[in-house]
Image (cartoon, rainbow, N blue to C red):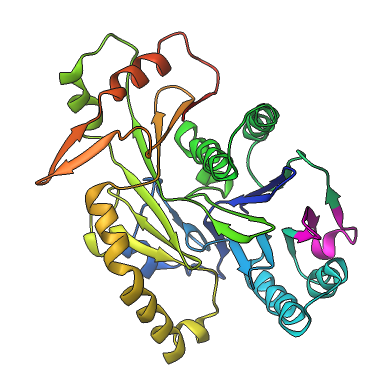
Amino acid sequence: MTYILGWKNYNSVFLVGDSVVTIDYPGSYSDKTYESNRPLTSFGEQQIFEKGKTISEKWLKLYDLENKVILAISGTIEEAHEGIKHFKMYLEIQNVIDILKAVENSFSDKDVKVLIGYMDENVPRLISYNGKNNSRIIQHDFFEVAHSGSIGESFINQTENFFAQIEVKGWSDEQILASIIAVTQSYGVQEEIIRQGVGGFFSGIRINKNGVTWQPDIMFVPFSYNGEEINSNQLAEIFGEAKRVLIQVRESVLFSCSPFIEDIKHARRPFGNFQPPQIIGSEEWYIERLAWSVKWGSEVNRNCDEHKAEYYIFYNTEKPIVGMIFDEWKKPFRISEDTIYFGEDLIALVEDLFCPQDEEFTLYIGF
């Protein structure tokens, strides 16, 4: 159970996915170690540890394969892992391969659905394949949304409506990807979707003729505002207590900084793609994680301390309205000597977006 989506324009293919994994355990066993370490997701959702079942934020479900293919998975994660290993062999052995044949050979007997993006002579291709449940590969048209997972129909409709608007916007591919993440991440603010097996952080990746690019650094700011007139002094009341979540991706590892997690040792945490227990327990895995920490640890932690991101996404927790700001033009936050200062544009943003009459889902873009 999960939620992934794919979409393409004439330049790129975009994939976005959540991070919650549902695991069924025999008898009464559940992942109590994970429960005690991090009972909440990055966005404060209560993870589920019930008799025989765990629903928790666990893995990054997007893959960059050799800078040639991007892939998103839903279904049984262990089987997806085996299929991806097989699929990567085709990419490593041959410079030019039959992607469709490789997908069928790798996933036809697996209980998974995959969304795959790649370039075919500078033309973006988006395909989906449902493993052993459906032997037919679907090739998706430009501006068509491909979905997979267990999220409710109302959110799928929101997604479809959002993509219908993108076609007429003059946004860059980076802005489009950040906007898709803004919309999908809002689902967990609007409703307790973790009970549907969906939730945690949503991440994004895209591919074009120049290769694969992960999402920009994004800070998410859920807050409450009832639409009354405000002044600059009240910004501290509105945003001062807001729990700002920063998501960064470096070399296919996502680093989550979450104030919802009280234990600082677990509030900042890297997430990678699924690996079986024997790999996680190996010395090679430990060395790889250590090398990543040495290379990126200082930078990603400093960004967390300074509230530094490329995009800031604001959610009114009382209404289905999302606002997004591009930091290169408008800087909503500044940290100096551990004190947070608010940009002048925040008053206008709050008043324009979160007025009492706004009841339907709305995305405001501030770039």
Residue 164, percent across and down? 70, 28
In the image shown, does 110 or 258 lie closer to the viewer?
A: 258
Residue at image coords 38%, 66% = 34
Query: Which region of the structure is painted magenta?
Result: 119-138
Compared across the picture, whether 264 is left or right of 195 comes to left
Compared across the picture, whether 242 is left or right of 290 comes to left
Residue 291, percent across and down? 37, 80
Residue at image coords 73%, 77% = 91
Q: Does the magenta stretch include residue 91?
A: no
Q: Does the magenta stretch include residue 131?
A: yes
Residue at image coords 76%, 59% = 119
Residue 290, percent across and down? 35, 80
Give the mark count.
0
Q: Farthest bottom residue?
A: 283
Q: Farthest left residue?
A: 337
On screen, residue 120 above or below 221: below
Residue 276, percent across and down? 55, 79
Residue at image coords 55%, 68% = 25
Compared across the picture, whether 358 is left or right of 156 comes to left
On screen, residue 298 above or below 150: below
**Quadrant (top left/top right/bottom left/bottom right) for the N terminus:** bottom right
On screen, residue 351 above or below 127: above
